[in-house]
Amino acid sequence: MPFLLRPCTTKEELFDRDEEIKEILRAIEKSNVIVIEGPRKSGKTSIAMVMLDILRNRGIRARYIDMEKDIVNGVESEDLEIIVLDSIENLRVLRKKIYPLLPEIKDRNTIFILVDPPENSIELLKRVTRKRIESITTIAINEWDKDRGISYIEQGLKECGVSYSHNELREVIDTIGTLPGWLAIYGYQRCSSNLDHSKALEETIRIATEIAKKDLEQILSRKSPQLRRVIRMLVKGARWYEMLRETTISPYTLNNFLKNLKRLYIVREEGGIHRIVDPIYSLAALGF
């Protein structure tokens, strides 16, 4: 099945991320902490899991931990050489789930790979593990360009034997962007749900927008209601002073909010204008 709604686990399942995997493998040779960051649905977890599969096939003792779902127990066998920590919701969760691993990493040269960690995660890691972190490498996983996005859909549709037109492929990219996760949803609707192009695109927009809306709701949780206005302004693009003028929030609050959205790759700033870059997140933001 070329379009997966779960993370890829083998190199054969993953499309086009060879350079990113090579970059991580090179970083492992020189760093003891690697941070993988990028937009939601860009394929960070898939890349991490495929990279782990490659390492295990080389005889390297590695473990993947979903900090949101996995119950973390100590490892009774050999000492771990690499630990991947994914879905780190906050520092409290990181602190709680790292403790059972301490016997396996104490006085060892364990390498940590953090997927989209919250701020201050590395400082917490230092304190909890009492490890000396000598080198940190940050690797950004970005959305595809338009040509790669089209190639991904085209190759997958060919594999499933679904007919398509190039106008349809361009409409998909123009409508939902080039994040692999959104494109996989569209492909899944065509191949597994047997929907035609229009219905598949409509269903993809519905599903993807709900995911993006939940993300934004979580970001806005327990924050000033005025920030919902800021989110809406970011759809068309706004300058810092415009957002400040149109709300009653403080410069400090606005700066921190924008900083967090940039860290999450939801917003980019170009020429002093802040804008939500992904069309799906833009659609979701209009509902606030």
Image (tube, helix red, strand yellow):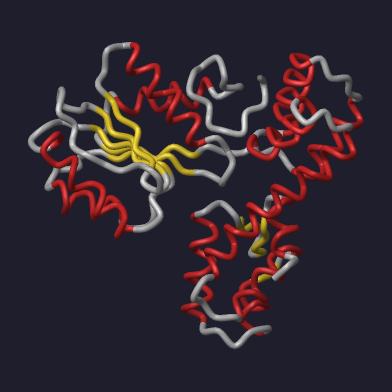
**Residue drawn at the location 71% of the way across and 35% of the way down:** 183
Q: Is residue 233 above or below residue 172?
A: below
Query: Residue 134 placed where, x, y %?
Result: 20, 40
Task: Say left or right for 256 vs 162.
Answer: left
Q: How many numbered discs, if any?
A: 0
Query: Residue 142 placed where, x, y %?
Result: 57, 39
Query: Residue 69 placed where, x, y %?
Result: 40, 45
Front residue (pair 27, 61)? 61
Task: Say left or right for 247 vs 120.
Answer: right
Task: Say left or right for 108 vs 279.
Answer: left
* Quadrant that contains the N terminus: top right
* Quadrant that contains the C terminus: bottom right
Front residue (pair 273, 26)? 26
- Farthest top residue? 58
Task: Say left or right for 268 vs 21.
Answer: right
Front residue (pair 233, 199)? 199
**Residue drawn at the location 27% of the way across and 42% of the way down:** 72
Front residue (pair 230, 43)? 43
Query: Residue 208 placed where, x, y %?
Result: 69, 48
Q: Is residue 96 above or below residue 259?
A: above
**Residue drawn at the location 71% of the way across and 59% of the way down:** 284
Image quadrant assignment for residue 169? top right
Image quadrant assignment for residue 119? bottom left
Q: Is residue 224 above or below residue 286?
A: below
Image quadrant assignment for residue 227? bottom right
- Farthest bottom residue? 248
- Farthest left residue? 107
